[in-house]
Amino acid sequence: MIEISLGTTAGGGIVYPSQLDKETVFEWFGLHLNPAKRIEFMCGLLHMCQPLELRFLGSYLEDLARKDYHVLRDFEFRANSPSDLGVLTDVIDPVVRSKLLVCLSLLGSESRECAGILFRILSHVDPALFSAGPLEQLSLLFAMASLHPAFHFHQREMVRGQLDKIELAIKEERRQSQLRINAQITVMSNKPTLVPLNIKLAQNLLNFNLSSPCSSFPAPDNSVNIVCVTGPGSLGLVPAAMLVSY
């Protein structure tokens, strides 16, 4: 989220900044929002626009969309064809998910029949069957359906409820992933480290510190490989042969 510093007047009212850093907003939108949140954010901004602003933005968007019209014309026809949509039922298949995303992007605002088909497909989706990557795709799919004007109000409400469950599943997946990472870090930090030592240096250390735990071991000769065990609960300097039981 973008953090905006707000001040207060003497009477306790909120003072809003006169100007936002556009580059920060653009960076946040382009780099820090996932596709589903980008769609929701843009739709939220459009809802806050005045009627004349919407008409202007409509003309602007129409001009932008015209550039890709010939490329997307065939896909748009399929997206608004009930017979083509009816076969896209296996949402677990990544190819089907990609096609559904394209269809929802190109679905006409008055294609009620196609929206009904898509709604029935989405109604049978179980988020528990998907991992983190596919869940992100589902999040985008359900976000678009929950905002698309071709869907009836009650359909959008039901899709929104499913979207909330998907977002919770994504958060839980991220939490579990972080727990696994933390567990691996803990294991690695507690793992003893074996550092080979010079034999003569090891002999001098053993003879010098008679009170060390190593004093109970026989003095090593040149045929014994001495290692230094470091880390929590380490044994200190020990012959390598004794590390088998360790």
Image: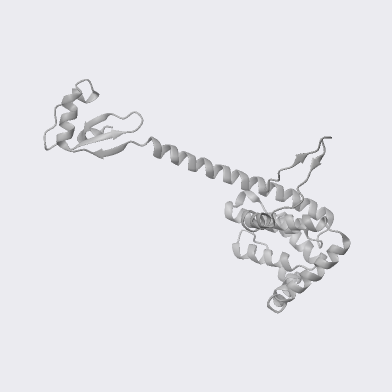
Which color scheme is applied?
one colour
Identified at 76% across, 55% down, the residue is: 146
Task: Using the rendered view, name the quadrant where residue 47 is placed.
Answer: bottom right
Q: Nearer the viewer, residue 232 or 93?
A: 232
Task: Using the rendered view, name the quadrant where residue 72 is placed.
Answer: bottom right
Determine whether 212 is above or below 142 in the image: above
Q: Is residue 131 visible to the viewer in this orientation of the structure?
A: no
For this orientation, the residue located farthest to the front is 10
Count of residue discs: 0
Give x and y (percent) for residue 101: 68, 64
Determine whether 243 is above or below 142 in the image: above
Identified at 20% across, 23% down, the residue is: 209
For this orientation, the residue located farthest to the right is 51
Horizontal side of 122 relative to 220 (left or right) equals right
Give x and y (percent) for residue 94: 60, 62
For this orientation, the residue located farthest to the bottom is 70
Identified at 66% across, 45% down, the residue is: 168
Give x and y (percent) for residue 79: 73, 70
Q: Quadrant of the C terminus?
A: top left
Q: Nearer the viewer, residue 69 or 172?
A: 69
Task: Using the rendered view, name the quadrant where residue 37 is placed.
Answer: bottom right
Horizontal side of 198 relative to 180 (left or right) equals left
Q: Is residue 60 visible to the viewer in this orientation of the structure?
A: yes
Horizontal side of 172 relative to 66 (left or right) equals left
Identified at 71% across, 56% down, the residue is: 142
Give x and y (percent) for residue 169: 63, 46
Q: Nearer the viewer, residue 16 or 62?
A: 16
